[in-house]
Image (spheres, rainbow, N blue to C red):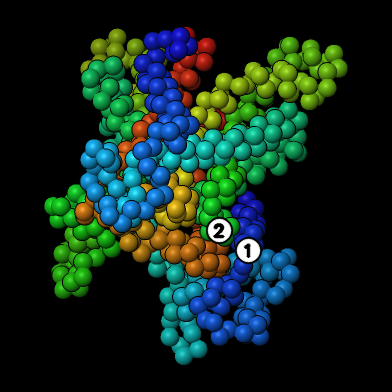
Amino acid sequence: MLIGISLISFFIMHLAPGDITSSEAAFNPKASEESRQKLRELYNLDKPVIIQYGLWLKRMVELDFGNSFASHQRPVLWEKKDGKGNVIKGLIQESLPITLLINLIGIFLIFSVSIVLGTISAVKQNSIVDKSITFFIFVAFAIPGFWLALLLMYWTGVVNQWLPISGLHSLDYKSFSEVGQFFDLLKHLILPVSISMLSGLAGISLYVRNGMLDVLHQDFITTARSKGLKEKNVIFTHALKNAILPLITIIGLSIPGLIGGSVIAESIFAIPGMGKLFYDSVLMRDFPVIMGILTIGSVLTLIGTLIADIGYAWADPRIRKGLVK
Amino acid sequence: MSLFKGNLLAIIGFIIISIILFVAIFAPLLSPFDPNYIDINSILLPPSYDHFMGTDGLGRDVLSRMLYGARISLFVGFVAVGIATLIGIFLGSIAGFYGGWLDSIIMRLVDIMLSIPSFFLILAVIAFLTPSIWNIMIVIGLTSWMGVTRLVRAEFLSLRQRDYVLASIVMGTSNTKVITKHLLPNSLTPIIVSSVLGIASAVLIESGLSFLGLGVQAPTASWGNILTDGKEYIQFAWWLSLFPGLAILVTVLGYNLLGEGLRDVLDPKNK
């Protein structure tokens, strides 16, 4: 699986017409053919593709994604010591936690809000509340995130100045107390998190609603009702548990979408996360960083799926005991 | 229309899509100005009788650009989904019909493609191939065939067990003929539904890419790159941001409603 991913990301990089030397030459008219050749040797670009892949794979196993072409040779993944013993932080090392933070908050919120919305919608099926929630879901599905981001930026940031519209910290955040810094960060996160969770929220609310409707029509619910349980108990203890079980898997499956979505949210709000790093590297044709992020993104997805599988087994005794495959 | 009887949402979706089709086809007749005509004397005019949606930073008429943008988004949606569906049908048929090691290889490939965040993949490829409308369509197509493949494979696996298919195989019908005459026509419904929903997401991806400057390139008008201009002028020219966004929203909503509606209408289980 991992080898497949690495092959694909490597293959894509070599689809490219032009290489780093041509973009560097574009910035520097004095670059001669000779110095280009030196550059190619430096990055092993003069060797056959198979050997380049082998070299890259070998370094990947050692978790070394090489150095960035563009930003002064900074290591792609993890910190390294340079010749003078200074520690230089890796690009992904710095940006990944930010993206993870945004997406984890996002997933948590998606989970909680969609369960509430979906349950209300299912329990009051065909009522006005249900209709408006379903309508909201369809609109949220269709709304382009970057457009909503623009409108929200304009409305909350420019017209009303309620929220900061870019970056992660205020300019003077170092002068705040720790609590102040925390709230400053929180304020900066509100817009990006809401944008990145929107389409996920819509999908999963719909999922909860349909799951809940299915469960509510099953025999054990009728049994529970007819033995005189309160409606509240029927819904919260009997139905909900069964309806939200598959969510664990769905959340696992939605991770690639969330990570991919962070490109747009982060570049609009100028957040120095992995999505923005990726966008910048794409513009700079920074091979090692692009390959590194593609691989790390896929590994994250695999980890997410694995956690989802384990979580499912943990939550569902039928699977844990091997009764259902 | 009688097909959608009683399914209000599907009818709304159908109407929206028909209007957009109409607008896109007749864009040259409907648009009051040349979409690329630069008029220095009418920069950033708010909506008025002459310019229903105002003008942009170069004095171009936004309504005309929107009409031509409809063409782009429609074109990208159809071609990208066409590519994805063809690949999906081809690989899915092979996997579902022949099974065995071919099936394993194809399904592994699907798993691998699904675990790479697709927007990253698209961005990477686009940037390296230099952005253009053709590259976008091909890349979106090449990165969104996995769903159709799974769908076709699953349909084939269950259809293969039916008596009429077995009978046809026993009678010595060639494999290609069994696939094209018996299996494919019977799995068409889910394929159509997923294609319509696929167009919706292709439209969203295209506008996102154009917005980031990695999609349809200026001066060709696309809803995404009109929005990029809108971002520049958001403090003075709300009309530049509002209309293209609304157009994308309504179009995607239309395809989604139509797709969901078709699913309800065509699926005999729901009757």
Direction from residue A280 to residue A240 in the image, left or right:
left
Residue found farthest to the bottom = A84
Q: Which mark is residue A17?
A: 1
> Where is A126 relative to A64, above or below?
above
CA separation in Å, label 2 and label 1: 9 Å
The kind of secondary structure element at disc 2 is loop
Q: Is residue A228 visible?
A: yes
Which residue sits furthest right? B172
Location of residue B105 by image quarter = top right
The quadrant in which residue B187 appears is top right
Is A314 or B113 nearer to us in this picture?
B113
Q: Position of residue B215 (x, y in %)?
A: 48, 51
| x, y percent for residue A194 | 29, 47
Name the mark on residue B130: 2
Task: Decide if residue B98 is on the left or right side of residue A176.
Answer: right
* Residue A41 point in image, percent of width and height: 66, 80
Whether label 2 touches label 1, CB < 8 Å: yes
A154 vs A295, nearest the viewer: A154
Is A163 rendered above or below residue B247?
below
Inspect the image, locate mark 2, and give the three-letter code of the amino acid beneath it: Thr
